[in-house]
Amino acid sequence: MMEWSDLRVFLAIARTGTLGAAARVLGQTQPTMGRRLRALEEAIGHTLFQRTAEGFVLTDEGSLVLAHAERIEEETLAFQRELSGNEGQLEGLLRLSCSEWFGSCLLAPVLAAFGARHPGVCVELLTDARLYSLPRREADMVFRIKPFDEPEVVSRRLLHMPYAVYAAPGFDPSGLGDGQGARLITMDTGFAQMADAVWLRQRLPEATVAFRSNNRQVQARLCADGAGLAVLPRPLGDATPGIAAIDLGEAPPGRDTFVGYHKDMRRLARMRALLDLVVERLAN
């Protein structure tokens, strides 16, 4: 027979990715965690994780169990809140993924407000260039510029992000022409086909590409230090000291930002609460 308490062990491993980290979350020892996971897998007759060099990755059966285990956890927390008279209090972990600049400039203030409303929820924010997988439950909610096409993912367009060309204060764009003599800061070669990078090459074909980076905040810092012109998202560029938007006769193309989450998370109260606040603060 399956021990219900082993579902807590399973959830901790699924969320942290290692036995050691899960043991610290639950205040158990690593051997105990491994023993209880094996007992759970034997009880249900399926392997729930692939053991890899990077950690524990959910199998297809593990993903199925995860969806049900999270609903069981949510119902358990719900009746505990109801019995204690704290129906409005939410608890648990939410793992989010977005680009570094988006997390810093736009998402951080929303998360601070969410934390003030729901101090029992721990939000883990992952900011790097990797596309975290929602079907594999590597993240609970993802913000990105690429639309979601996975059938397991519920998504929506969150906002349209305007972009602008930035330079150090006092830069005179009137003599730029086709860009001869100008220095550019743009995306690295792996992202060279992004709309703003293509637009910059076409708008200033004779300019010299001086720096490339896949990190927008690095681009903004280089621009502020006088390294060249950069196309940046306006929330980042406008918030960066030492640079100002310049007019080249037309604005670079903006980008839509999408938010997505796994369909099995729709009934998770802490997910709904965070999504509602994100939409309220950021959607346009």
Image (cartoon, helix red, strand yellow):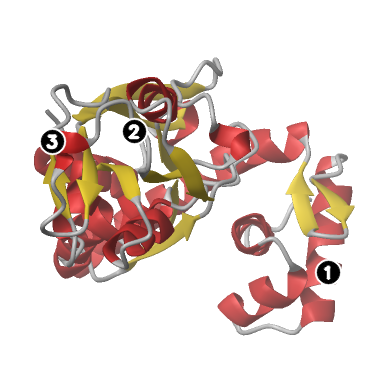
- State which quarter of the image contains the C terminus: top left
Where 180 sits versus 18, above or below?
above
Q: Earlier in the sequence, mark 1 or mark 2?
A: 1
Label 3 element class: helix
Question: Residue 72 versus residue 148: which sits nearer the camera?
Answer: 148
Q: As shown in the figure, which amino acid type bears the numbered disc 2? A: Gly
Number of other residues with Cα within 10 Å of mark 3, as a class: few under 14, some 14 to 19, many 20 or more:
few
Where 103 sits versus 118, above or below?
above
Give me the residue at 40% from left, 50% from top.
74
Q: Earlier in the sequence, mark 1 or mark 3?
A: 1
Question: Residue 194 versus residue 92: which sits nearer the camera?
Answer: 194
Q: Earlier in the sequence, mark 2 or mark 3?
A: 3
Task: Answer whether labels 1 and 3 touch (C-beta < 8 Å).
Answer: no
User: Which numbered mark, 1 or 2, is in the foreground of this view?
Assistant: 2
Residue wearing tag 3: 174
Can you tell which mark lies on residue 179?
Answer: 2
Residue wearing tag 1: 34
Give me the residue at 35% from left, 43% from top.
182
Mark 1 → mark 3, Cα distance in angstroms? 67 Å
Q: As shown in the figure, which amino acid type bears the numbered disc 1? A: Gly
Q: As shown in the figure, which amino acid type bears the numbered disc 3? A: Ser
The spot of residue 7 in percent (x, y) is 64, 56
In the rendered view, does 132 fall on the left or right side of 158? right
The spot of residue 95 in percent (x, y) is 46, 54
The spot of residue 64 in percent (x, y) is 66, 33
In the rendered view, does 178 fall on the left or right side of 211? left
Residue 159 placement: quadrant: top left
User: Which numbered mark, 1 or 3, is in the foreground of this view?
Assistant: 3
